[in-house]
Image (spheres, rainbow, N blue to C red):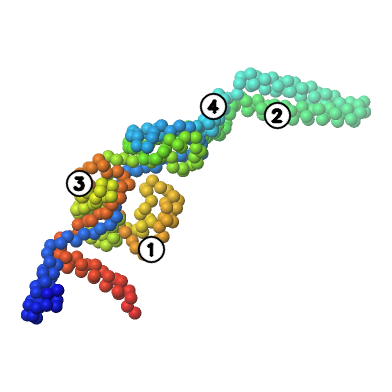
């Protein structure tokens, strides 16, 4: 009050000048330019285990927080339909294999012998029919026989001759065996049956839902899924590899031009009461996304992610996802924890730091207003 209202002018103005100089001087003191944003912790990898079949969950073998080995069974489906399909496919393979074996072996000797006997019998019958036809023809020429008897003998000879031709063709076929094309067709039928069996066996294996990685089950109340019916693509469990924990920072899109790998990062999480954590930038995303696009978990399908994004109406603001590796592993850190992060971009002064934001607003926002 004394500086503002009291005292002579030669006392007030020098004091004001000193204060102004102090403010200007403070603006040139070293000040770190930082890019900030919200962050959340993520594991090294996160995989969603989904059902490949429409079936009922028979049993859950792991609970939330349990450690599982790679290829470990998390859940088991009933698999009645899959097992029946496998048995049917196995029967088709057996039938096709037998058919191919029969084609390769050719016709049975007794069938060939029977065909030969039939040819011999029909040959004798044809000889007799031709002799009878000749006799009836001679009688007819001397008017000693009726015309209908001659025609009957002629019809008998022709039908016997046609039957003999068919029997001879059948004998030649049996004697020659199956054609190469028929054997190839039988082999193709067997190959198709084996492919169907392989698919059926794969479905049987799919009744066991296994984790491809070593990690920790991260599905709350997963044991309550027992007895539920699942459809192809339904999420059954989530497994996280927590061998290392990273922070994913959702920073202002200016970070795309400023942040580089190896830069220092300071983080304060709600879950550890704001204790300061430090790390280094591991990777910077190559595209800026909306808040909704950055929210879904990586194990979600596109359809599920779109449902999640409906809760975040799109706007013109974009963010850059930055992956941060912690300097020291803290066992209290869990995937999903959130907080705030600041990335040290440059050692500068306060005025230069403020000028960056003022310049961006002037050159982008104010410039867009100009007529």
Q: Which residue is labeled 2 in the image? A: 166
Q: Residues within 10 Å of mark 3 (few under 14, many from 20)?
A: few
Q: Earlier in the sequence, mark 3 or mark 4?
A: 4
Viewport quadrant of the C terminus:
bottom left
Q: Which residue is labeled 3 in the image? A: 327
| Inter-mark Cα distance, 3 to 4 | 62 Å
Q: Residues within 10 Å of mark 4 (few under 14, many from 20)?
A: some
| Left or right, 52 with reference to 216 | right
> What's the mark number on residue 94?
4
Q: Which residue is labeled 1 in the image? A: 315
User: Nearer the viewer's eye, disc 4 or disc 2?
Assistant: 4
User: Nearer the viewer's eye, disc 2 or disc 3?
Assistant: 3
Residue at x 64%, y 27% (from the top left corner): 172
Say what secondary structure mark 2 lies in: helix
Residue at x 19%, y 61% (from the top left corner): 33
Q: Position of residue 76 (x, y in %)?
A: 45, 32
> What's the mark number on residue 171?
none
Q: Earlier in the sequence, mark 2 or mark 1?
A: 2
């Amino acid at each position: 009050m004394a500086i503002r209202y009291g005292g002579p002018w030669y006392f007030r103005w020098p004091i004001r000048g000193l204060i102004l100089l102090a403010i200007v001087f403070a603006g040139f003191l070293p000040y770190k330019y930082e890019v900030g944003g919200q962050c959340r912790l993520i594991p090294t990898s996160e995989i969603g285990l989904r059902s490949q079949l429409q079936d009922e969950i028979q049993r859950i073998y792991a609970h939330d927080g349990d450690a599982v080995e790679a290829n470990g069974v998390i859940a088991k489906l009933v698999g009645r339909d899959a097992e029946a399909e496998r048995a049917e496919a196995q029967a088709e393979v057996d039938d096709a294999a037998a058919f191919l074996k029969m084609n390769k072996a050719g016709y049975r000797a007794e069938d060939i012998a029977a065909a030969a006997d039939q040819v011999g019998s029909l040959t004798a019958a044809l000889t007799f029919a031709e002799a009878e036809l000749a006799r009836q023809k001679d009688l007819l020429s001397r008017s000693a026989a009726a015309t209908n008897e001659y025609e009957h003998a002629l019809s008998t000879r022709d039908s016997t001759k046609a039957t003999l031709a068919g029997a001879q063709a059948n004998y030649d076929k049996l004697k020659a065996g199956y054609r190469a094309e028929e054997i190839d067709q039988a082999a193709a039928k067997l190959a198709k049956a084996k492919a169907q069996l392989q698919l059926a066996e794969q479905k049987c294996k799919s009744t066991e839902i296994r984790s491809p990685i070593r990690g920790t089950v991260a599905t709350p109340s997963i044991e309550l899924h027992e007895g539920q019916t699942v459809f192809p693509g339904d999420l059954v469990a989530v497994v996280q590899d927590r061998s290392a924990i990273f922070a994913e920072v959702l920073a202002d899109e200016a970070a795309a031009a400023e942040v580089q790998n190896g830069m220092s990062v300071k983080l304060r999480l709600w879950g550890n009461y704001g204790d300061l954590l430090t790390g280094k930038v591991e990777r910077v995303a190559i595209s800026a996304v909306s808040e909704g696009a950055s929210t879904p978990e990586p194990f979600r399908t596109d359809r599920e992610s779109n449902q999640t994004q409906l809760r975040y109406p799109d706007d013109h603001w974009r963010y850059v996802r930055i992956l941060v590796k912690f300097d020291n592993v803290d066992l209290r850190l869990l995937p999903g924890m959130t907080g705030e992060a600041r990335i040290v971009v440059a050692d500068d002064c306060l005025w230069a730091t403020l000028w960056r934001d003022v310049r961006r607003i002037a050159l982008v926002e104010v410039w867009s207003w100009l007529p």
